[in-house]
Image (cartoon, rainbow, N blue to C red):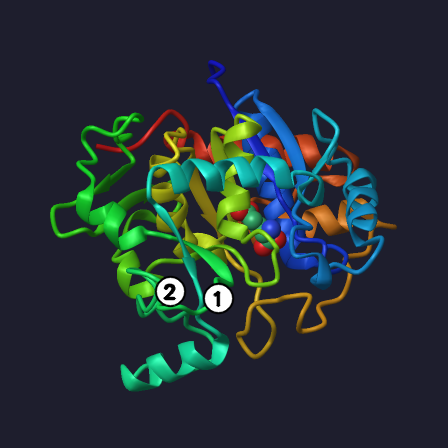
Amino acid sequence: MSAVAYCGRFAPSPTGPLHAGSVVAALASWLDARAHQGRWLVRIEDVDTPRCPPGAGQIILQQLTALGLQPDAEPVWQSARGALYAHALEQLQARELAYPCACTRKELEQAWRAMGLQSNGLQERPYPGTCRHGLQGRPARSWRFALEKFIKNTDFSLTGQAPAAHFFVDSAGLVHWHDRRLGWQQQDPTQVAGDFVLRRADGLWAYQLAVVVDDAEQGITHIVRGEDLNDNTPRQLLLQSALDLPHPRYLHTPLVRQADGAKLSKQHGAAAVPTDDPVETLTQAACFLGLPAPQGESCLSDALNHWVNAWRATYNGPRP
Ligand code: GLU
């Protein structure tokens, strides 16, 4: 297979050690990078510092090393990259695509209730737009991306990064994107998220901004991550357009679920993955990805051969 320009990454939030689900995402992104003869980077997404116990990032790096998943460069840590995110926010402000927001949690809940949008604890609710045209004397708390305005006012065929064949916005404002596993996807991001937060009221950078800035700064061309993030993709594609950044390709992997069907997550106490038997851990992750069980010590190279066969058709670009 000929090499394509490829840089992939694994970007765990160190809210705890790797569990069976995060190992699946790590292995899939590693396999896809190696199958493309590309680079593979690790980025520790510790931007939400209060949720990251001290030492958890280092434990994740040790777990990856024990599994033989070695990045091609020193891992980067989001907590040290605030200046990059601040610069991106300034660019959006200069383009009038970011605005301050004064809404408190309580005010948002009231607005959502008035709109008949009750929380089901799972689904996001779109920003009601309260501060879109000014703060009405209230103190600014957070910064938001002017997503509705951006969609309405942008001719996506003219943006700096011409719409890649795997992403476009139609005349009704629906975002369409191609996922290498899930196929064509579509979403109206004004219904899902609306004008989403870039910088939070507590001063921390929001995941959406940090991930877009970092993927571009690190030259990431291909994102392979868990399917729980698929819904976030349109927001990230739009932010990339607003900042004139390239659009990576996306592949969302199946989610490992608990017995009750909920996503396996650190918040729900998922067990740290054992690394004393790396072959067993990698074999389980490979089988979960639908690959034939790799054999013993040559586990990673076996899994790689299987991955190449499984994903060959999706390597070199979007389907028409
Ligand atoms: N840090 C995110 C997580 O651990 C992943 C971000 C991404 O891959 O875009 O869920």
Residue that lies at the very extreme toward the right in this rendered image: 276
Question: Could you say which disc has been placed on residue 135 in the image?
Answer: 2
Which amino acid type is marked by label 2? Leu
Among all residues in the image, which is located at the extreme top?
2
**Whether residue 239 is visible:** yes
Callouts 2 and 1 close, C-beta under 8 Å: yes
Q: Give coordinates of residue 162: x percent, y percent.
A: 26, 26
Q: In the image, which disc is placed on residue 298?
A: none
The answer to whether residue 119 of the structure is visible from this angle is no
Where, quadrant-wise, is the C terminus in this rendering? top left
Residue in the image at 72% along x and 54% along y: 14
Q: Please tell me whether residue 70 is drawn above or below residue 77 in the rendered image.
A: above
- Nearer the observer, 95 or 117: 95
Q: Nearer the viewer, residue 30 or 55?
A: 55
In the rendered image, the vertical position of residue 36 relative to residue 8, given as above or below: above
Q: Position of residue 256 (x, y in %)?
A: 58, 62
At 53% across and 35% down in the image, what residue appears? Answer: 87
Q: Is residue 180 left or right of residue 19?
A: left
For the residue marked with disc 1, what is the amino acid? Answer: Pro
Asked which secondary structure carries label 2, the reply is: loop
Point 46% across, 75% down: residue: 122
Q: Position of residue 242 (x, y in %)?
A: 34, 38
From this viewpoint, which residue is outermost toward the left? 171
Mark 1: which secondary structure?
loop
Q: Which residue is mark 1?
A: 139
